[in-house]
Amino acid sequence: MSDVTALFGARAQDYASFRPRYPDTLFAWLAAQCPERQRALDIACGNGQASQPLRQHFTRVLACDASLEQLRACPDRQGLELFVAEAQAQPLVNHSLDLIQVAQALHWFATPAFFREVGRLLKPGGVFCAWCYSLMSIDPRLDELIEDFYWNTLQGYWPAGRASVDAGYSDIHSPFSPLSPPPAAIEANWRLEQLLGYLRTWSATQRYEHSNGFDPLQQLEPALRQAWGDANQPRFVRWPLHFLAGIAN
């Protein structure tokens, strides 16, 4: 089991509770690009957050993750075919999928072997789409605190691959015919406790705690509380999405 898989599995329930939800319009757009809508696969699906919306658009929705703990944290499995698999080694037949998506995970396994596997699995004209989001925006003071935590406190604790998220996947090259999704963002109204829960799901936060024996958010939390104000007052939070998408030949 990789370091990243172990980290995500250890806090699988936190991922299910605190990771933000993707806009429904994204999945409707993806389905509209597919010549057929028989089978879709969500790779590195985690708790199924991006798998569930596909049920509205595809006859069968498959979803896999390298972490069994993440799959067990899926809150709504109805209509999903869940299985454990590494991203680059799928137990599926050639040219059997209309869509393959990867939500906030491609940077952990964006290798030639993975893209060969995607090419093997997609039907001609099938769609591949991966996306990521990095830092959210709330207001200038909160953004400043979170950016300092991200770039300075957690420097050196992000696993290899995280730089691709900071680059918006512009450093990853796909072998498929390029496809440009429309601009999209995740939007939420969160209380402070939701923000703190989300920050604790960051892989670097967990690695910092494992290395140093304490939660680094303990140092940041007082300043966040002061800048937030009433902790129960929801704040608007926005994460722009960045895409790498293409069509199989």
Image (spheres, helix red, strand yellow):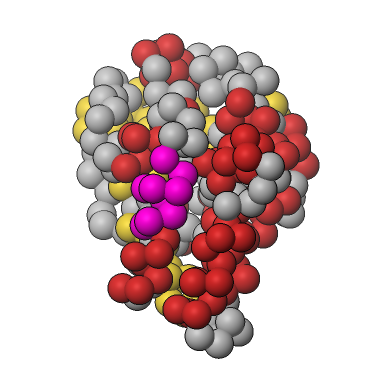
Residue 227, position in %: x, y?
A: 45, 78
Front one among 195 and 51: 195
Q: Residue at x 69, y 26 (%)?
A: 84
Q: Is residue 9 magenta?
A: no
Front one among 16 and 226: 226
Q: What stretch is highlighted in magenta?
A: 147-155
Using the image, determine if residue 185 lies above or below residue 140.
Answer: above
State left or right for residue 168 relative to residue 90: left
State left or right for residue 243 relative to residue 65: left
Rendering quarter of residue 243: top left
Quarter of the N terminus within the rendering:
top right
Q: Which residue is drawn at 52% across and 63% down?
A: 220
State left or right for residue 29 relative to residue 228: left
Residue 29, position in %: x, y?
A: 36, 53
Residue 198, position in %: x, y?
A: 57, 58
Q: Is residue 149 magenta?
A: yes
Rendering quarter of residue 221: bottom right
Q: Is the magenta stretch mostly helix, strand or loop?
A: helix
Quarter of the C terminus within the rendering:
top left
State left or right for residue 145 relative to residue 11: left
Front one among 169 and 166: 166
Using the image, determine if residue 220 lies above or below residue 228.
Answer: above
